[in-house]
Amino acid sequence: MMRFRAPGAFAVEVSHRRNFQRAGLGALTAVALAALVAPHAHAQMVRAEGRLVDAWGNALEGVQVEARQADGGGSTFSAVTDEDGEYLILGLETTAYEFTYTLAGYQGVRQLREMRTQRGAPGRLGRREEPIELAVLPLGQVLNDEFEYEDESGAFSLTLTPDGMFEFEDADGEGEGTYYVQDLDAILTVRDYDGPDDKYTIREPLTLTAQTNQFLTLAWGETTLNKK
């Protein structure tokens, strides 16, 4: 046959064969990739959002949030709450997750949440969670008895109790909160106050310093409180 005397014919046959082989390999590769990607493509991703507060409803900033699948599979997701106590985690699967919330000075909390999508709103959680409340834990010691203080003018009064709580009254209103003792300092966090909203914040605790470990007087700036 003359085909062997025509080099071009042989080259054409080889070229067609190679193209066919490449096309076949490409099809097989596409099928293999589709098999690998398909389960993930059909998995519905959702988002988790929430808010962390103390017992008085104050937003807690800096709470460490971790989410991991309840069955131990998948990846671990993490976030930190902002100044409004809110967090957002993206890319969760529609399954049960165990959430943990931790912050120094507070009792950690674990929560089991079933992640589902909201009908008509892909990728969002089916319902917004209620705020998660973290109980306060003292970072130091507390006084073993109730101590009442007052300044010379009587405009400021303070009561520290052995359960780590305090109540106070100043010229603008009344309030309460939690405290702990570190060396000669009483660290007070005002958590509820009926005076001006911007006067106290849980992000800026008050430090009152005693002269001795008997805590007979407390100094706060230019104010001196004497034990009654």
Image: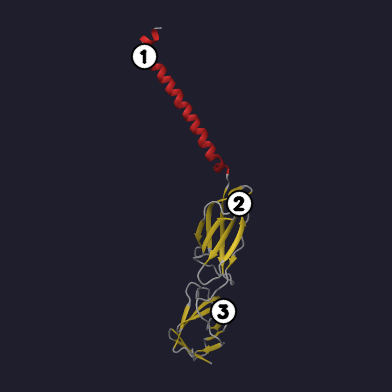
Of the residues shown, which amino acid type is indicated by label 1? Answer: Gly
Reply above or below: 215 against 203: below
Compare marks 1 and 3 and give the one earlier in the sequence: 1
Q: Residue tagged by mark 1?
A: 8
Cβ atoms under marks 1 and 2 closer than 8 Å: no
**Circle number at residue 95:** 2
Q: CA distance from mark 1 to mark 3?
A: 96 Å
Label 3 CA crowd tier, 10 Å (few <14, some 14–19, many 20+): many
Compare marks 1 and 2 and give the one earlier in the sequence: 1
The part of the image, by quadrant, that contains residue 178 is bottom right
Residue 149 visible to an observer of this rendering = yes
* Residue 220 location (% of width, % of height): 45, 84
Nearer the observer, 133 or 118: 133
Q: SS for tag 2?
A: loop
Label 1 CA crowd tier, 10 Å (few <14, some 14–19, many 20+): few
Quadrant of the drawing holding the C terminus: bottom right
Q: Residue tagged by mark 3?
A: 176
Viewer-nearest of discs 1 and 3? 1
* Residue 152 location (% of width, % of height): 49, 92
Reply above or below: 215 against 94: below
What residue lies at 40% left-to-right and 20% top-to-bottom? Answer: 15
* Residue 177 location (% of width, % of height): 55, 78
Compare marks 2 and 3 and give the one earlier in the sequence: 2
Of the residues shown, which amino acid type is indicated by label 2? Answer: Thr
Of the residues shown, which amino acid type is indicated by label 3? Answer: Glu
Q: SS for tag 1?
A: helix
Q: SS for tag 3?
A: strand
Nearer the observer, 1 or 130: 1
Query: Is 227 on the left-hand or right-hand side of 118?
Result: left
What residue lies at 47% left-to-right and 74% top-to-bottom? Answer: 204
